[in-house]
Image (cartoon, rainbow, N blue to C red):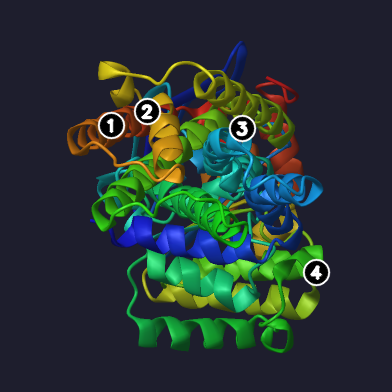
Amino acid sequence: MLNRPLLIARKEIIDHLRDARSLASAVLYTFMGPLVVGLMLLARSDGASNPAAQRTLPIMASVFALMAAFTGGMSFAMDTVAGERERRSLLPLLMSSVSRGELVMGKWLAASVFAAAAVIANVVAFSALFKVARLAFPLPSIQSLLLLAGALLALSALVAALEILASTVCRSVKEAQAWLSILVFVAMAGGMWLAFRPPLQGWWLAVPVAGHQRLLHAAMAGGALPVTAVTVLIAASAVLTALLLAHTGRLFRRDAIIYGN
Amino acid sequence: MIQVHGVAKSFGSTVAVRGLSFDAPDCAITGLLGANGAGKTTTLRMIAGVLEPDAGEIRVGGAAARQLGGQAELGALLDHTGLYGRLTARENLEYFGRLRGMPANLIEARVSGLLASLGLGEIADRPTARFSQGEHLKVALGRALLHNPRHLLLDEPTNGLDVPTLMVLRAQLKRLRDEGACIVFSSHVLGEVQALCDRVVLVARGRVVAEGTLAEIQARAGIDTLEQAFVKLTAAVGEGPC
């Protein structure tokens, strides 16, 4: 049952990795956060020991990591549905015994891989930077690291589903680019707003994206992650992802989605 | 066998196909002949299962066209080649072979054979983005023929092909027909239809205006040449945009 979606995902990943310009852009966005924070630390000699920096840097890192999840698969998502529709390469796929559901699954899987690679690379780069800068954040426990990894994978899957849906409803690559850029901006602005508010409590932690930002912040500062809250967050993200994919699958039955008119 | 019965399709206020019916039998090349805008491409897209008819029924080898069972033994080259530019010609074909569930050794043998017969051997491992229009078309033809389909749909497949490839295509189509395949071939080039087709379905303004062998079409029009028969029969329903 998963054979064709996996075949499609594999081809999409190989194909996209050969697109040097879009890959360079994704890498640049992924490491933009660690680069900016690293330059700030270089500019201030007391950066690492400054209490304000100790408080602010994990917040900034959490917002940049959230953004990396959105930018990592953005150009792929644009190209894989809106771009393919423009090039009319969706048609041969749909004439090859590939169901529309399998097509959506394959493209979503590939977008999830790019989003997950970006957010994990971003978090690892921030951790390395904080270690090099000798910021005194305690290392999270193995359990917290596993919980964080699970939450980040769920975030990547959710963001990928959202981006594939956006690319599906847009009529051209240009339109998809405009809407996906707005999506990244909303994630960044929302993350920044949440980051400087009092810490989220209770059911807010189970709200996808907002809960992820709070988890990332806690993990970057070396805090322990609450098992129940993370489990609920992962489950909520999975449900939302499934709903978005089901909606995209339904949209793919429309002629206009395949032909763009 | 491909059976099209009472099929209609509109795009907004534009009626593309109105109550079109015909059968394309096995062991025959059926030519769908009509002027630009007659509804040939829309009909082929509906047979291929990528467009949903507003009315009517289409069956491919007994299965409904929109069902994947109907597509399993269907090969199609419609109005766009839709190749992946960053993949090589070989990779494009291998990908579709895998999607169709062909065994790896069969994919390798079929892809190599098709690339050689279509004259793509030397450029088989280059990304298709750098290919000419004719080379694009050859790869797309290879993709349509890859799984030796029992039903084959070709929409103006000879546009942009060089003479040697045209001869290869004709030979491949005749071989497939002799092996029992049902081939539907759309064209507005009368010479191409005469050279290849066993039966002709004449389409005008989204309707079938005549069908049969070339001799039957000419007899019905009472004219000796297909060209004049085409003009006479289509003029009866008024050609031009629907």
Kindly report the distance in space between the C-alpha atoms of the residues bearing marks 4 and 3: 55 Å
Asked if badge 4 and badge 1 are on a common chain, one would say: no
Q: x%, y% of residue B141? A: 60, 67
For discs 4 and 2, the disc positioned in front in the rendered view? 2
Which amino acid, mark 1?
A: Leu
Asked if badge 3 and badge 1 are on a common chain, one would say: yes
Question: Could you say which disc has been placed on residue B130 in the image?
Answer: 4
Question: Along the line of sight, which residue is nearer the eye, B103 or B216?
Answer: B103
Which amino acid, mark 4?
A: Arg
Which amino acid, mark 3?
A: Ala
Asked if badge 1 and badge 2 are on a common chain, one would say: yes
Given contact means CB atoms under 8 Å apart, are the residues at marks 4 and 1 in contact? Answer: no
Q: x%, y% of residue A85? A: 61, 40
For discs 4 and 1, the disc positioned in front in the rendered view? 1
Question: Could you say which disc has been placed on residue A211 in the image?
Answer: 2
Element under disc 2: helix
Q: Quadrant of the N terminus of chain A?
A: bottom left
The image shows residue B108, relative to residue A219, as above or below, that is below
Q: x%, y% of residue A191? A: 54, 26
Determine which residue is flagged by label 3: A52
Label 2 CA crowd tier, 10 Å (few <14, some 14–19, many 20+): many
Question: Along the line of sight, which residue is nearer the eye, B54 or A17?
Answer: A17
Determine which residue is flagged by label 1: A233
Given contact means CB atoms under 8 Å apart, are the residues at marks 4 and 2 in contact? Answer: no
Residue A171: quarter of image:
top right
Element under disc 1: helix
